[in-house]
Image: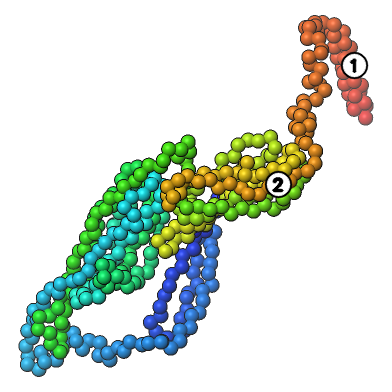
Amino acid sequence: SRTEIINGSVSSSHSITMNYMPENKGDFELKPFAIEINGKKITSPGVNIKVGDPVQTARKSPYPNLYDHDPFDDMYGKKQEPEFVDVKDDAFLALTPSKSEVFVGEGLTVDLSFYVSDDNRAIMQFYDLGKQLSEILKVLKPGNCWEENFNIENINGEPITINGKNFTQYKIYEAVFYPFNTQPIEIPSVGLEMIKYKIAKNPSFFGTNRQQDYKTFYSKKKEIKVKPLPPHPLKDIVAVGDYKLDESLNLESVGTGESFKYDFTIYGEGNISAVEGPIMNKTKEFDFYSPNVSQKINRRNRKVTGNKVFSYFGIPNEPGAFHLGDYFNWVFFNPKSGEYDTLSAKYSLAVHGESRKNESIQATDLGSFYDKISLDNNTLESADSLFWVKILANIFILASIVITAIFVFKK
């Protein structure tokens, strides 16, 4: 996902990548489709997909219903119901946190997975997973945390070794939690219902040899301790994570009154959405404007990484050599080192030209009319001296109207 703030206007984009494996060869059509975004209809023309010969093809029985019916039942005119037994499974459901304790604001990766041992002999498969997962997530997410969900769409088995034993892991949920406060992160036990088949006690060559049944697997509840940040004047507002600085300056030499562009990019691992820009102190040497902001977040490999770019436009007011590190500093807490760190600008800016101090004074000058206020006499005067002037003006106006009327009627 990517978010940009330019001149106060917010725009965001989301990209979803999914992998598919074809089951048959041939030409297939991904049909055209349309979606509505902010009241505007966006269309996709679709695409043709050509699937070639398979690398390895599983042979299918030409008689798919052969094992569901025993022909000997018809031969002898009778049918005996088979006896089914439960096979012990070697599988479990587990929610695994990446750490047992974290700092406030530090990322905690958790995943909910179903594990099946290589020695397992029970036949199982997922049941109505979408509906179950929506109910699980309602109770799984802690109320005191910000969540970055990895949005798993495809569940694929991955080999994994636990205490020297081989398993296949089916990951059904993964997210990173960022705690807001020092309250412990409590993750309750959740259940996942699976289809588990019973096996016929005396299997026959023909006929049904298994029976569908259900079993619910439960994860263990977890509690993760949340530690407060060490004392610091900015401990309540700093970001937490492992961050670095990337910066760019379009001009290294500029005249007073001319604009320049400076990008302050924070990148690394952490809650990118919560990253705020550097705290700017008002200075007479420069006029800095509110930055345009853009961010990019990546969720992969059990980590949330990304960058956030703060693009500043500035105008220098005074000539001289200036180190931008005196104006752009960003403090954060690094949980890996357990210490506060500061990202400071490395660029320097050479400013030439005349000081704009006098321009500022002229800009605040109200003009000669207001300059004379303090020198003029403020004594009240009577308006009676203008009485005869008003009488003469009224006579002149009345005469003008009469003369105009005569010309109009005469014509």
Image vertical order of residue 256 relative to residue 50, above or below = above
Residue depicted at 53% across the width and 69% down the height? 44
- The amino acid type of the residue labelled 1 equals Phe
Q: Quadrant of residue 255?
A: top right
Q: Position of residue 239 (x, y in %)?
A: 47, 46
The reply to whether the C-beta atoms of the residues labelled 2 and 1 are less than 8 Å apart is no
| Label 1 residue SS | helix
Residue depicted at 18% across the width and 66% down the height? 215
Question: Is residue 131 visible to us here?
Answer: no
Question: Is residue 168 visible to us here?
Answer: yes
Report the disc number at residue 396: 1
Q: Characterize the local packing of mark 1: few (<14), some (14-19) or many (20 or more) Cα atoms within 10 angstroms.
A: few
- The amino acid type of the residue labelled 2 equals Leu
Q: Quadrant of residue 202?
A: bottom left
Image vertical order of residue 64 relative to residue 193, above or below = below
Distance CA(mark 2)–CA(mark 1): 71 Å
Q: Which residue is mark 2?
A: 349
> Is 133 left, or right, of 387 in this rendering?
left
> Is 235 left, or right, of 97 in this rendering?
right
Q: Position of residue 290 (x, y in %)?
A: 61, 43
Q: Position of residue 313 (x, y in %)?
A: 66, 46
Name the N-terminal-most of marks 2 and 1: 2
Q: Which residue is at the front of the view, 278 or 156?
A: 278
Residue depicted at 30% across the width and 59% down the height? 96
Residue depicted at 43% across the width and 88% down the height? 53
